[in-house]
Image: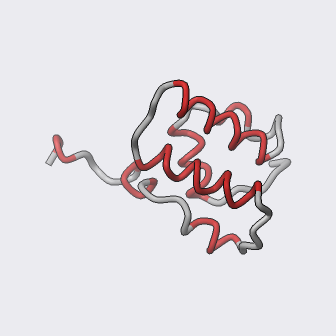
Amino acid sequence: MKYEYTEKEIRLIKEFGKESLIDKIPPVTLYRVMAREAFLDNRQDVYADSVRRCLRAIEIQFPLNKKEFDNLIYGCEELDSPSKDNQ
């Protein structure tokens, strides 16, 4: 992998269907693409909120280690858990 992403970031990227861009564009650009999509689609979910928080931290160059950055991403744990409909 050209750029390093955490597991939570990868799950977030997959939620937006942008996994094909992981090695093609820098992370800040990828987060901008996802934020743009969230805006255009008027997404009001935890994934869109997570993208906005992460992009804001990147753009203001807020110094975060990987764990602190992962803490900005909420909701990606739900992608791995069984849906409530299947229980």
In x, y percent, where is residue 21?
73, 33
Front residue of 35/69: it is 35
Task: Say which residue appears at 67% left-offset and 51% top-offset.
Answer: 55
Task: Say which residue appears at 59% left-offset and 65% top-offset.
Answer: 70
In x, y percent, where is residue 5?
70, 56
Quadrant in the picture for residue 13 = top right
Q: Is residue 86 left or right of residue 23?
A: left
Task: Say which residue appears at 33% left-offset and 54% top-offset.
Answer: 81
Query: How is this picture coloured?
Result: secondary structure
Q: Is residue 81 shown above or below 23?
A: below
Question: How many marks do you count on the picture?
Answer: 0
In x, y percent, where is residue 69?
64, 67
Q: Is residue 12 shown above or below 20?
A: below
In x, y percent, where is residue 48?
50, 43
Q: Is residue 16 shown above or below 40?
A: below
Task: Say which residue appears at 16% left-offset and 41% top-offset.
Answer: 85
Which residue is farthest front?
60
Q: Is residue 18 left or right of residue 29?
A: left
Which residue is farthest top?
40
Front residue of 40/2: it is 40
Q: Is residue 19 shown above or below 11?
A: above
